Image: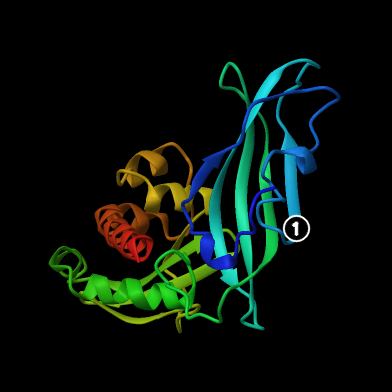
Amino acid sequence: MASRRYFEDFVVGQRSSGPSWEVTAGIGPAEFPGLFGDAGGTVVEARWQHLAPVETGATVRFEETVTRCRRTRDGMHGLVTRHGCVVDRRGRTVCEGSTTVRVLARGSGPDPAGRAFATPEWAEALAGLLAADGRFTEATATWDGAIGLRCGAEEVQLRVYCGSVLRPGTRTPLGATFTLGATELTWTELLTGPDNDFIRRAMSGQFDVRGNGYEYLRLTKVLDILVDNARQLARQDGAA
């Protein structure tokens, strides 16, 4: 039996895969190897969709990525969200979704903010790095507006005025000039992956933009610099 894993054992960006198994009577998420038993917690949400039919007798494997870790208000538990997919022998994803599990914590924190994407704490830490990046200061030296960043259901806004981030938080007085949004999995892959491939992901439609599209296009370079700093923040917390 696998040993219990606590909240602190999970880190956003962790990737793992289970052993291959033979499909005997359809694919039920509760049967995925390692999905629930390794955490020893309570499932609070599960969303899955079947993308392709799977024949009985087919061999498939399960892969997952931790996309969010949030401590509960009592301080002694945490919510861990993992995106998973079932892949067949041809590399085709036949089922995917996410599961959030409530698990016991070893202590009461504090938790690092670098991988809690689009939270107020993350925005504050990111603003600190941007203030020290001359590329960001130069690229926004004449700009006045607010950049919104949305990760799943979480959103923060960075109020930028003449090279400085003034008010990082969930809202700004006049709202975001534009908001860049994507799924938790997309942000996790972008900020914890080997390279900053923001431009490629944006061009392939993995991000959606709400608000002033012209200003978004004009600030593409700024967003690329912002992602560089967010990746640095994530690496710092990952190392810690």
Residue at x 20% of width, y 66% of height? 136
The answer to whether residue 183 shows anywhere in this view is no
Residue at x 76% of width, y 58% of height? 43
Q: Whole-percent x and y of residue 151?
A: 52, 60
Residue at x 81% of width, y 36% of height? 28
Task: Tell me which colouring the rendered structure shows.
Answer: rainbow
Hey, which quadrant is residue 79 in on the image? bottom right
Look at the picture and state if 238 lies above or below 121: above
Image quadrant holding the C terminus, namely bottom left
Q: Whole-percent x and y of residue 34?
A: 67, 44
Judged left or right of residue 9, residue 61 is: right
Q: Secondary structure at mark 1?
A: strand
Residue type at the position of mark 1? Glu
Judged left or right of residue 22, residue 7 is: left
Look at the picture and state if 125 lies above or below 47: below
Q: Whole-percent x and y of residue 61?
A: 63, 28
Q: Nearer the viewer, residue 138 or 92?
A: 92
Task: Give the residue pinned by disc 1.
Answer: 45
Q: Residue furthest front?
A: 1
Q: Nearer the viewer, residue 88 or 227?
A: 88
Count of all numbered marks drawn on residues in the image = 1
Q: Residue furthest right?
A: 25
The answer to whether residue 78 shows anywhere in this view is yes
Q: Nearer the viewer, residue 53 or 174?
A: 53
Hey, which quadrant is residue 166 in on the image? bottom left
Q: Whole-percent x and y of residue 25?
A: 86, 24
Hey, which quadrant is residue 126 in on the image? bottom left
Judged left or right of residue 83, residue 237 is: left
Residue at x 83% of width, y 27% of height? 26
**Disc 1 packing (10 Å; few <14; some 14–19; many ≥20):** few
